[in-house]
Amino acid sequence: MSATALSRYTRTAIAFHWLLAAAIVVSFSVGLYMTGLPLSPARLKLYNWHKWAGITILTLSALRLLWRLAHRPPEDLPMAPWQRTLAHTTHRLLYLLFFAVPVVGWAYSSAAGFPVVVFGVLPLPDFVPADKALAEAIKPWHGRLAFGLAALVAMHVAASLKHQFVDRDRILSRMWPSRA
């Protein structure tokens, strides 16, 4: 196996990365859009889709973490120690928020008295008891955590592009799907 092949992530890791990235971008976009809509059947439908996306993100995150724990990533490419520390810290925070954002959203939905019914057929247990005061306390945290995740994703993308186009050190190519 060549050094280039050894430095790449596995196809499974790449698939998890891009599926999760797409789900997060779509869910965040739908979340921004739906909150500005007046109460209507369309808004309620988008809220349900947003919840389904959240549960999908939570599931993908758990599967991705299990995969990551069982499969070592490729070795780090040479970079300054501060960059390596920042990259590892950012990845840990991303993983934390992959779980925190949907769990807090689920807790908010439960506290508000709106059950999560995945794809309209699989009712999930309430994460917390229905409590209007609790719902009001939780609600802003879902948004804050989601915006924090969006900021970290933007940093991650910016760093990837910097490595690709300024440093030219192949980091982006390790996670890009191959044509073979």
Image: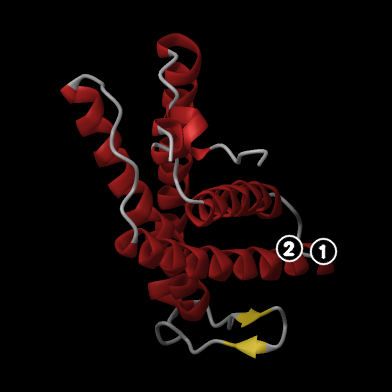
Q: What residue type is labelled 2?
A: Leu
Front in this rendered view, residue 148 or 66: 66
Q: Distance between the residues labelled 2 and 1?
A: 6 Å
Spot occupied by residue 73 in the image (x, y as percentages of width and height): 34, 47
Quadrant of the image containing the N terminus: top left
SS of the residue under disc 2 = helix
Q: In this rendering, would 104 be left or right of 121?
A: left
Residue lying furthest top:
166
Mark 1 falls on what kind of element? Answer: helix
**Residue under pointer 2:** 46
Q: Which one is nearer the viewer's eye here, 112 or 27?
A: 27
For label 2, the crowd category at 10 Å Cα-Cα, with few meaning under 14, some 14 to 19 and many 20 or more, is some
Task: Tell which residue pokes out farthest to the front in this image.
Answer: 1
Q: Are marks 2 and 1 in contact (CB under 8 Å)?
A: yes
Residue situated in front as seen by the camera: 134 or 4: 4
Residue at x-position 54% and y-position 83%: 113
Q: Residue at x 49, y 89 (%)?
A: 125
> Residue 97 location, x and y as percent?
38, 54
Q: Position of residue 102 (x, y in %)?
A: 47, 64
- Which of the 4 quarters of the picture holds residue 117? bottom right
Amino acid type at mark 1: Ala
Using the image, determine if residue 44 lies above or below residue 87: below
Quadrant location of residue 137?
A: bottom left
Residue 92, horizontal then vertical, whole percent: 29, 48
Q: Quadrant of the C terminus?
A: top right
Query: Which residue is labeled 1 in the image?
Result: 42
Whether residue 105 can be seen here? no
Q: Is any atom of residue 77 visible in this view? A: yes
How many numbered discs? 2
Badge 1 local density, few (<14 within 10 Å), some, or many (20+)?
few
Q: Residue at x 39, y 40 (%)?
A: 6
Tell me what residue is drawn at x 39 percent, y 36 percent.
7
